[in-house]
Image: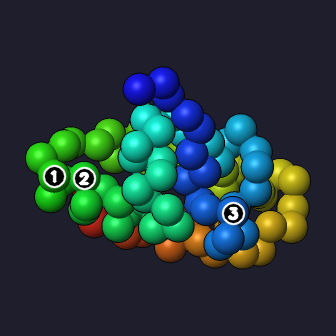
Amino acid sequence: MPPTTDHLVPRVRGGPSWLENEVAACRRCNAQRGHAGAADWVRECRGRGWEPDVEHLLAVLAALQGAVARRGGQRRAREAADRQARRLERLR
């Protein structure tokens, strides 16, 4: 399947359409993930026998948090990114 881009912090949760909020994902995973948070999707993937790259997801969230700090605004995205980062840290 061709890769797609997926918003790590979903748009419905305030995630911006910025490069810092996008990761590559196969079309199937992107569609099945829907609006689930990154930590929830990591658990789902592990349940299916897949091992997602949690370190990469944490790096993307850190880049997003930095971009939000530099650009300002994006309160919902900042809160969602912080929450997802804390949850992903526990899944390391």
| Disc 3 residue crowd, few under 14, some 14–19, many 20+, Cα 10 Å | some
Q: Is residue 26 left or right of residue 71?
A: left
Inspect the image, locate mark 1, and give the three-letter code of the amino acid beneath it: Arg
Residue 63 seen anywhere in this rendered image of the structure: no
Disc 3 to disc 2, C-alpha distance? 21 Å
Q: Earlier in the sequence, mark 3 or mark 2?
A: 3
Q: Residue drawn at (35%, 67%), measured in percent from left and top? A: 40
Relative to 2, is 88 on the left or the right? left
Mark 1–mark 2 CB contact (< 8 Å)? yes
Secondary structure beneath disc 3?
helix
The structure residue drawn at horizontal position 46% and vertical position 67%, both measured from the top left corner, is 36
Residue 75 picture quarter: bottom right
Percent position of residue 48, x then y: 16, 52
Looking at the picture, tell me which residue is in the foreground, 82 or 31: 31
Q: Tell me whether the residue at label 3 lies in contact with that at label 1, contact meaning CB atoms closer than 8 angstroms.
A: no
Which comes sooner in the sequence, label 3 or label 1? Answer: 3
Give the labeled residue for mark 2.
45
Pick the quarter of the image with the N terminus.
Answer: top left
How far is mark 1 from mark 2, CA to CA?
A: 5 Å
**Residue beneath disc 1:** 48
Looking at the picture, how far across and down is residue 33, in whole percent?
Answer: 43, 58
Q: Dot 1 lies on which element?
A: loop
Q: What crowding class fits label 1: few (fewer than 14 Cα within 10 Å), some (14-19), or many (20 or more)? A: few
Residue 69: quadrant of the picture: bottom right
Looking at numbered disc 2 in the image, what kind of residue is underneath it? Cys
Q: Residues within 10 Å of mark 2 (few under 14, many from 20)?
A: some
| Left or right side of 34 for 54 | left
- Name the residue carrying label 3: 11
Q: Residue at x 50, y 28 (%)?
A: 3
Q: Amino acid at mark 3?
A: Arg
Above or below 85: residue 31 = above
